[in-house]
Amino acid sequence: MLTKPEFRMLVGLPGSGKSYYSKEFIEKNPEYIYLSSDNFRKEHGLKDTDNSFWDEFNQLAKLFLSAGKSVLYDATNVNSKRRAELLNRFKKIDCTKTCVVMATTLDACLKNNRSWSRDHIVPDTSVIKFYHHFQFPQYFEGWDNIVIHKPHDITMSKTYCVETILKNVKDYDQNSKWHKYTLGGHMTRVGDYLKSKGTDEELVLAGYIHDIGKPYVKTTDDEGQSHYKHHDNVGAYESMFIKGTFNRVRVAQIIALHMNAHMPEWAEKYKALIGKPGYEILKDVFMLEEADSHSWE
């Protein structure tokens, strides 16, 4: 029995199983108010591309929480800034804030989306765009709990072995002026550096896999140089499928922020927050940045 209301947000790509999760959850927890962006659009005759309703939709969540009602909030919710802004609306409400991340592979999301019996199926290009822009949730957004949910259907998930990953990209040419090592060589150097510094196994793991998103987002410019925009987002997403027993949320959070740490303005702002409640992950992020920079030498 909950002692105070819970705001439970689902974060996932289109086709990741959010609606299925919601159906099962509400059946077991009928006291929760179910707010679905898809349902809201349908009930109000809005197109899937119409985003004019969000303020009203979010106000509903606030009203229910203020009345002591728990809320299950179903939308893609892949943007960190928007999640934080929404939670800020609830800062004066005594409620538990839980984020549930749907760990469903991109291939499964695409397959599920194509099979939907609805008037408008989300185009594959849009699902892939969500994948590239997926910002893994951070506690400093305002969460009390962040959990990863894997679907019951194992065909919607997968597992990676770290050794296999490094072997597969051992000779992967990054084709970039910023890197003189292959992708596998670079990640191995980063992981080895962290290990040599006596950091814990999860941070070392993050080092060995921090750039696994690169092959998924590679583009090449007119001069033949390769670029890997959003590889941090995709790498964090793919890290949810790494084989083993470890804190997947922590590893994904580190990978999600590792490129930010190379940006001077971001680094200056967030280094001042290390150690503050909700910002504990930053110590790991800047340690990975140190290893990442060292590996370029």
Image (cartoon, grey):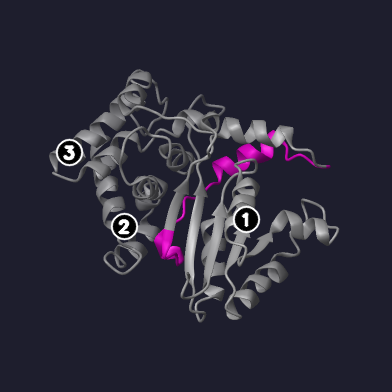
Q: Are marks 3 and 1 in contact (CB under 8 Å)?
A: no
Where disc 3 sits, the SS reads helix
Quick one: 181 or 2, which is closer to the camera?
A: 2
Q: CA distance from mark 3 to mark 2?
A: 18 Å
Q: Which element type, helix, strand or loop, lies under badge 2?
A: helix
Name the image quarter holding residue 140: bottom left
73 or 255: nearer the viewer: 73
* Region of the chain picked out in magenta, as a range: 119-145
Judged from this view, the residue extending furthest toward the right is: 45
Q: Amino acid at mark 3?
A: Lys
Left or right of residue 28: residue 244: left
The C terminus: image quadrant: top left
Residue on which the image places disc 1: 27
Q: Which mark is residue 195?
A: 3
Please identify the quarter of the rendering in which residue 292 is found.
top left
Instruction: Give me the residue at 35% from left, 27% from top.
Output: 161
Specify whether residue 25 is painted magenta.
no
Mark 3–mark 2 CB contact (< 8 Å):
no
Q: Nearer the viewer, residue 46 or 7?
A: 7
N-terminal label among 3 and 1: 1
- In the picture of the structure, the residue carrying the numbered disc 2 is 282
Residue 191 image point, x, y percent: 24, 35
Is 54 or 294 nearer to us in this picture? Answer: 54
